[in-house]
Image (cartoon, grey):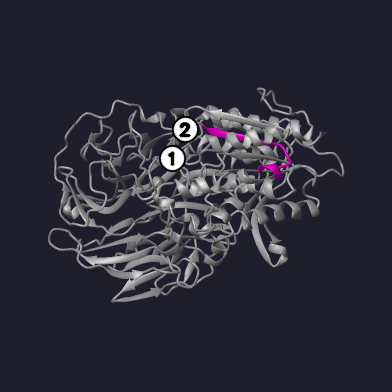
């Protein structure tokens, strides 16, 4: 074994290997035993393709180019397709229309031309219609506030030709993009789709029904700011759905409603079942016995509840999270097997588990190698989900609930990492908040089968701050994390206060403390590792994207702990974000920072851009030129400020990229540039042949 300085270790985990045959996996479905999922393909400009298994279990692409199965409702989309047998209905990103496709035939538009968006597509077969959340914007030609139950659009399809523009060139991104990381990352980690350039409340979100015969649209419910999860009962007599209103986000106070349907399928006066102030409902689902289930948190933890005969009852009380933040519509964590038992997933102690909830309230864990489980769908004896683990990249998995046998249908990365090269995460809990509180994270030690660091020397550390900020990190194998550890870096992936998976109280610790508590936790984690000899105090770096980019910039601005940083489309001016953002997040900062504009002084006090003179270490910026969430000038103004101070600074701008990077070439360039930047700042020579990066003042 060679003794080499940390950071200089040669590694087979190259940027080329990471992006090659790498996809982003999302939105699992099960219909008639056929499993479906979406693949976001960097090699196709990030286009989302629906893939389904055939009768023999073989995977086949369903969505032809240039179609892109993706929605921008609530800006983050989700629930972009529905399936029944060989038929698929999906939202096309380029024009927002719903299309219908039979088998692998060419898709045909169902809804009329226009700029309305549709998501959370749910089939209501008895009435031959799709239920959906529809979003319209000022200037769309459709009402932005129409409370009537009359059909808004009863036209048949105005056109039958598919769009001619290639939607694969879109510059937005799904929630969850971790800068430079494997594009298969959990899509619930971080907001990312590029919103429209429009005022905060220019849009109207309502619940509609779309005829699968002629595409006509009927309003089912309106009047709330946001809608989600239309869920018809199996007998077609009732409809459940979720709503929430500003300033709440869905994880704050989403309400579950239930209404009887009349002969035309229009809901009557709804009854509130769960949720409201200080309590959030998630994923309504009907059991085979006719009871309505959901996840809700009246006691501070998202637990499973059952509504029957006018009573809502907690079916298993635990200090665990059976729900997730509804960044994307269509998010699911439980379903019913052929025996009517609940098959569910929950997070406890930083890991997701899979289990079966019996009618007596007993929760029996189903043995599984997967510690990250997302998009869980259950049909008969089969469960399907996106699974990940410390030694396994995210994958589409089906599980036979009777035999316990599982089958991997698609992995997010073709890269094979030898076990001797693999850095396995250590779940870490460390003191923060002056020692009175704790934060969580995963520590990855440097590891390489052929290299070790000099005796008595500690490795450089990269602290990763996830986005959201109402998100969470994961212990799923991420080739981009291994890119760093195999070269001699240690990595700390922080679940700072405000992260989900630890109950409402932990999540709400970030309220009015964004830019303070999260930063404090990243600093505390880095110092904890340095004090225990697992990181070099003189070589601490921090990186993050979007909200994580803001945490990164705030840590570098307001603390003197880190010696280098990397900001990916990071927020530097909170005022700009508060004054001009999309409706879904228009009041998000009210809770995280304070009321806008009444507390403008707080926004300015926590904005790195207004305190750039306090920065004292090198930073590299990565920014998409088409970013409409965090405009490029936020990065450019920070770069200019550092340049004037004579600090080492670099900035890479990317044409055709928005808020989050989707293209393989961009991901490759970012990893290599960031490595070279650290090498120059920390004074080592990387083993890789890297393209040059212009670093001013170095």
Is 623 in front, or is 42? Answer: 623
Number of numbered markers:
2
Q: Secondary structure at mark 1?
A: loop
463 vs 382, left or right, is right
In the image, is residue 618 part of the stretch drawn in magenta? yes
Task: Look at mark 2 in the image and give the residue it sits on.
Answer: 626
Q: Which residues are magenta?
A: 612-624
Q: Residue furthest right?
A: 456
Q: State the quadrant of the N terminus.
A: top right
Is 323 in front, or is 201? Answer: 201
Q: Which of the 4 image quadrants contains residue 541? A: top right
Q: Secondary structure at mark 2?
A: loop
Is 368 in front, or is 130? Answer: 130
- Residue 607 location in percent, x, y? 60, 48
Residue 194: mark: 1
Residue at image location 69% in from the left, 61% down from the top: 432
Q: Is residue 533 visible?
A: yes
Q: Report if the CB atoms under discs 1 and 2 are less than 8 Å apart.
A: yes
In three-dimensional space, the C-alpha distance between marks 1 and 2, rounded to whole angstroms, equals: 9 Å
587 vs 563, left or right, is left
In the image, is residue 82 part of the stretch drawn in magenta? no
Q: Is residue 58 above or below residue 247?
A: above
Mark 2 is surrounded, within 10 Å at the Cα level, by few (under 14), some (14 to 19) or many (20 or more) other residues, namely many
Q: Which of the 4 image quadrants contains residue 49? A: top left
Q: Is residue 34 above or below residue 303?
A: above
Is 258 in front, or is 107? Answer: 258
Mark 1 is surrounded, within 10 Å at the Cα level, by few (under 14), some (14 to 19) or many (20 or more) other residues, namely many
27 vs 528, left or right, is left
């Amino acid at each position: 074994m060679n003794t080499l300085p940390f950071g200089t270790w040669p590694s087979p985990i190259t940027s080329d290997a990471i992006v090659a045959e790498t996809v982003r996996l999302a939105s699992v479905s099960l219909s008639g035993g056929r499993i479906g999922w979406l693949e976001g393909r960097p090699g196709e400009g990030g286009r989302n393709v629906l893939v389904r298994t055939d009768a023999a279990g073989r995977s086949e692409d369903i969505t032809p180019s240039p179609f892109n199965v993706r929605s921008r409702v609530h800006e983050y989309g989700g629930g972009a397709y529905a399936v029944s047998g060989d038929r698929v209905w999906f939202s096309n990103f380029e024009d927002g229309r719903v299309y219908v496709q039979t088998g692998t035939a060419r898709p045909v538009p169902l809804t009329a031309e226009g700029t309305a968006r549709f998501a959370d597509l749910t089939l209501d077969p008895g009435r031959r219609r799709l239920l959906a959340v529809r979003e319209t914007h000022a200037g769309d030609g459709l009402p932005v506030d129409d409370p009537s139950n009359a059909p808004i659009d009863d036209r048949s399809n105005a056109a039958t030709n598919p769009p001619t523009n290639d939607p694969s060139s879109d510059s937005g991104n799904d929630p969850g993009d971790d800068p430079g990381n494997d594009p298969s990352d959990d899509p619930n980690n971080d907001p990312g789709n590029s919103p429209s350039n429009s005022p905060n409340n220019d849009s109207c979100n309502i619940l509609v029904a779309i005829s699968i015969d002629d595409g006509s649209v009927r309003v089912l419910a309106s009047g709330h700011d946001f809608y989600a999860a239309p869920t018809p009962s199996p007998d077609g007599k009732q409809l459940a759905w979720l709503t929430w209103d500003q300033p709440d986000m869905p994880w704050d106070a989403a309400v579950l409603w239930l209404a009887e349907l009349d002969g035309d399928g229009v809901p009557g006066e709804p009854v509130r079942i769960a949720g409201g102030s200080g309590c959030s409902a998630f994923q309504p689902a009907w059991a085979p016995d006719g009871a309505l289930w959901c996840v809700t948190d009246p006691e501070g933890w998202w637990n499973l509840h059952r509504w029957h005969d006018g009573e809502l009852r907690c079916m298993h009380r635990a200090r665990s999270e059976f729900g997730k933040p509804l960044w994307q519509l269509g998010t699911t964590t439980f379903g019913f097997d052929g025996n009517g038992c609940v098959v569910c997933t929950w997070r406890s102690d930083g890991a997701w588990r899979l289990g079966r909830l019996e009618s007596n309230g007993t929760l029996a864990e189903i043995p599984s190698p997967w510690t990250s489980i997302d998009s869980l769908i259950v049909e008969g004896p089969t469960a399907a989900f996106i699974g990940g683990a410390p030694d396994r990249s995210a994958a589409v998995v089906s599980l036979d609930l009777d035999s316990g046998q599982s089958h991997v249908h698609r992995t997010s990365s073709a890269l094979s990492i030898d076990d001797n090269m693999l850095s396995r995460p250590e779940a870490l809990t460390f003191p923060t908040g002056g020692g009175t509180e704790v934060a969580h994270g995963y520590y990855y030690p440097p590891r390489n089968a052929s290299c070790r660091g000099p005796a008595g020397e500690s490795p450089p550390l990269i602290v990763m701050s996830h986005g959201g900020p109402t998100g969470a990190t994961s212990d799923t194998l991420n080739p981009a994390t291994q890119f760093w550890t195999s070269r001699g870096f240690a990595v700390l992936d922080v679940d700072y206060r405000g992260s989900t998976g630890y109950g409402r109280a932990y999540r709400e610790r970030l309220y009015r403390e964004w830019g303070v508590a999260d930063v404090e936790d990243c600093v505390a984690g880095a110092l904890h590792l340095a004090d225990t000899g697992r990181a070099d105090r003189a070589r601490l770096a921090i990186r993050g994207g979007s909200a994580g980019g803001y945490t990164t910039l705030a840590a570098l601005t307001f603390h003197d702990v880190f010696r280098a940083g990397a900001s990916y489309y990071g927020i530097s001016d909170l005022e700009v974000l508060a004054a001009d953002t999309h409706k879904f997040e228009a009041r998000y900062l009210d809770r995280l920072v304070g009321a806008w504009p009444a507390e403008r002084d707080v926004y300015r006090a926590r904005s790195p851009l207004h305190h750039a003179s306090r920065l004292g270490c090198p930073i590299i910026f990565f920014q998409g030129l088409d970013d409409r969430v965090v405009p490029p000038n936020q990065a450019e103004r920070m770069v200019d400020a550092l340049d004037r101070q004579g600090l080492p600074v670099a900035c890479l701008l990317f044409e055709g990229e928005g808020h989050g990077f989707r293209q393989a070439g961009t991901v490759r360039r970012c990893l290599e540039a960031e490595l070279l930047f650290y090498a120059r700042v920390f004074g080592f020579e990387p083993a890789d042949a890297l393209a040059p990066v212009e670093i001013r003042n170095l």
